[in-house]
Image (cartoon, helix red, strand yellow):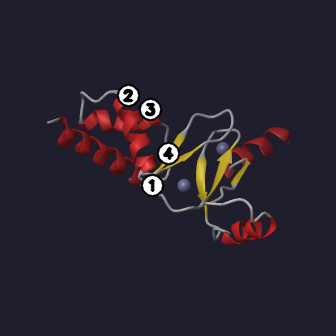
Amino acid sequence: MSRPRNTKQRQLILEVLRGTTAHPTADWVYQQVRAVLPNVSLGTIYRNLGVLKEQELIQEVRYPGSQARFDGNPEPHYHFFCLNCDRIEDVPLPFCRDAEEAFRQKLPEYEVMGHNTEFFGLCPDCKDLAERREQ
Ligand SMILES: [Zn+2]
Ligand SMILES: [Zn+2]
């Protein structure tokens, strides 16, 4: 009997993630889902995020020193991480499949299934702030 409820929770988590481009943490997702389903637990959120990730409906984005973040867009794309405010944004660059092909040609003994490229630095807001402080 618990299956339909699980499906409903998972659907809601997916909707929450698809409704934002902020690449939120599990905790943020939990707060949003709890507003609709007050009895949901953080453990349930984590479990469902894991299932959605396995089903390739969402992505997990990890930067060293930062909490895991989640993305409702499962298509491969590049991210920019701000080292100052931890903001993660999508980068509007074409995803370079050539890199995978180049890898295969150089190292044919491996099976490459994909690649990630993470840009990092300062977002425009933090860059402005840093520049103003220097003056
Ligand atoms: Zn920033
Ligand atoms: Zn993204």
Choose between 43 and 81: the one closer to the eye.
43
Q: CA distance from mark 2 to mark 1?
A: 20 Å
Residue topped by disc 4: 70
Q: Answer with the quadrant where ligand 1 appears in the image.
A: top right
Instruction: Tell which residue pokes out farthest to the left in this image.
Output: 1
Residue drawn at x 75%, y 66% is 108
Choose between 40 and 35: the one closer to the eye.
40
Whether the residue carrying mark 3 lies under 8 Å from ligand 2 is answered with: no
Instruction: Tell which residue pokes out farthest to the front in this image.
Output: 109
Q: Earlier in the sequence, mark 1 or mark 3?
A: 3
Q: CA distance from mark 3 to mark 4?
A: 10 Å
| Neighbours of disc 4 within 10 Å: few (<14), some (14-19), many (20+) | many
Residue depth check, mark 4 versus mark 1: number of the one nearer the observer: 1
Q: Is residue 12 left or right of residue 28?
A: left
Q: Amino acid at mark 3?
A: Asp
Using the image, determine if residue 97 lies above or below residue 4. below
Residue 42, horizontal then vertical, whole percent: 38, 28
The residue tagged with tag 4: helix, strand or loop?
Answer: strand
Residue 13, horizontal then vertical, whole percent: 34, 44
Residue topped by disc 1: 56
Residue drawn at x 50%, y 48% is 22
Residue depth check, mark 2 versus mark 3: number of the one nearer the observer: 2
Q: Is residue 96 left or right of residue 60?
A: right
Kindly identify which numbered label has been placed on residue 27. Answer: 3
Residue 83, horizontal then vertical, whole percent: 71, 40
